[in-house]
Image (cartoon, rainbow, N blue to C red):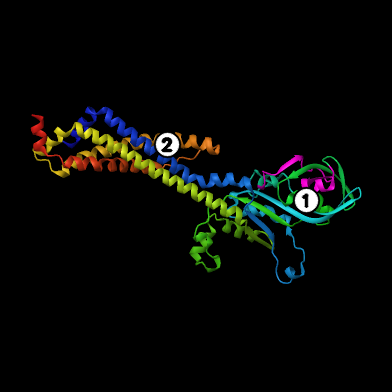
Amino acid sequence: MLFNIIRKSFLNQKKSMALMIASVAVGTAITASLITISLGISGKVSRELRAFGANILIEPGVEGMAGVSGQKRYLREEDIIKAKTIFWRHNILGIAPFLETKGEITVGDKTLQAVVVGAWFKKELQEPGEKKNFPAGIATVSPWWYIDGQWPDSAEKVVMGISLLSRLGIKKGESVLLDGRSFLISGVLETGGAEDEQVFMDMQALQEFKNLKGKISKVFVSALTKPMDEFAYKDPAKMSQSEYEKWYCTGYVTSIAKQLEEVFQGARVKPVWQVAETEGKVLGRLELLVYILSFITLAASALGVSTTMIMSLLRRIEEIGLMKAIGADSRKIASVFLSEGIVIGVIGGLVGYALSIAAASFIGLKVFNMGFEQRALLLPVAIGSAVLISIAGTVLPIKKALNIKPGLVLKGAE
């Protein structure tokens, strides 16, 4: 009997039912799309933020009297490739070593002391255990650096910071003496930072020039990380074994830094907190925004279902009054509306899930220039949320239906 009532209700109210299914489908599609985005947004946004600089710094560790005496310490260049052997190796998107030394620059009668930096500008490394090469160098950790000209492609060329170039009163294409040796200025660097007062040259050329073969001063690493939460800030030394394993196997910037410290001999690895914390805040706020929008969408869809169902109820007052007159109790009346809501929810959920696949792909391509992976787990979630929307929308109509007085309705129908 219930099946026949629902079937006739759908056949007799095609427009109302279609409107309610559409309302549920749209709400489900938007919600499922937002959930898909929230599940993948961390990696996508973190990858976008990597364009603003590295988030991990590797420096030589200073122990004992070395720090007091000011003894210069270096890292080993051969350890760089080991960064691609750690547990979170696939999260490392870029790596760039630097060798910092001091040099005397002479132009005519002007002589200045400046920081001379050896660097990889663009370099391909053979990734351990992989056939493909791994891109490294400044372009992978600081793609926003602006250079007028080109990076040095030989040992006789250098790039000079714009502020230093201005103080020397020379231009790109001219030559300078660096520690008595002539170099051609192939490009001018402008970052707005300390680099504007420095001289850059090829890493190997500087190592040979300063007799520092195989030595580097620091390494910047750009890695995809999970936003820091309360657990991430716990001291690993005070964790239990299970807590430490969980922390170590989670992609926090601190756990990745710890693993890098294990493969770089004599190194001290630390997050660049200004970058890491800003990234965490941005991701946290974006995820909160997604949840708020999802709640608003679900509430709006439920309101749409409720409004349409109330309009449907007004056209069915006599039917409900008759059902009550022949003995239908409140439970049976409520079951009719709930059953209709469930059917609407299931159909709307399936349609909404199908729409969410296209919606998530569209948003991903427009915002991040790449699609989001639609997870199969979202199908039951979409249907479940759609059914909840529909059931929530039946609450008010059910209350109104239960308050109908059969005697008054049937008397008015005469």
Q: Is residue 100 above or below residue 331?
A: below
Tell me the SS state at disc 1.
strand
From which residue to which does the magenta span run? 141-170
Residue tagged 2: 356
Residue at figure coordinates x 37%, y 39% from the top left: 28
The answer to which quarter of the image holds residue 175 is top right
User: Percent x, y for residue 264?
Assistant: 67, 59
Tell me if residue 152 is in the magenta stretch. Answer: yes
Q: Amino acid at mark 1?
A: Gln
In the image, taking residue 307 as reference, residue 274 lies left or right, namely right
Label 2 crowding class (10 Å Cα cut-off): few <14, some 14-19, many 20+? many
Give how far apart the Cα atoms at labels 2 and 1 are. 51 Å
Residue at figure coordinates x 57%, y 49% from the top left: 224
User: Percent x, y for residue 129?
Assistant: 63, 49
Tell me if residue 126 is in the magenta stretch. Answer: no
Front residue of this view, candidates 331 and 84 = 331
User: Percent x, y for residue 295?
Assistant: 38, 45
In the image, taking residue 62 as reference, residue 335 lies left or right, namely left
Label 1 crowding class (10 Å Cα cut-off): few <14, some 14-19, many 20+? many
| Quadrant of image for the N terminus | top left
Residue at figure coordinates x 31%, y 36% from the top left: 304
Residue at figure coordinates x 48%, y 40% from the top left: 373
Can you see residue 211?
yes
Residue tagged 1: 198
Q: Is residue 181 above or below residue 19?
A: below
Farthest residue in the bottom direction? 65
Can you see residue 377?
no
User: Percent x, y for residue 84?
Assistant: 63, 52
| Mark sitting earlier along the chain (2/1) | 1
The answer to which quarter of the image holds residue 30 is top left
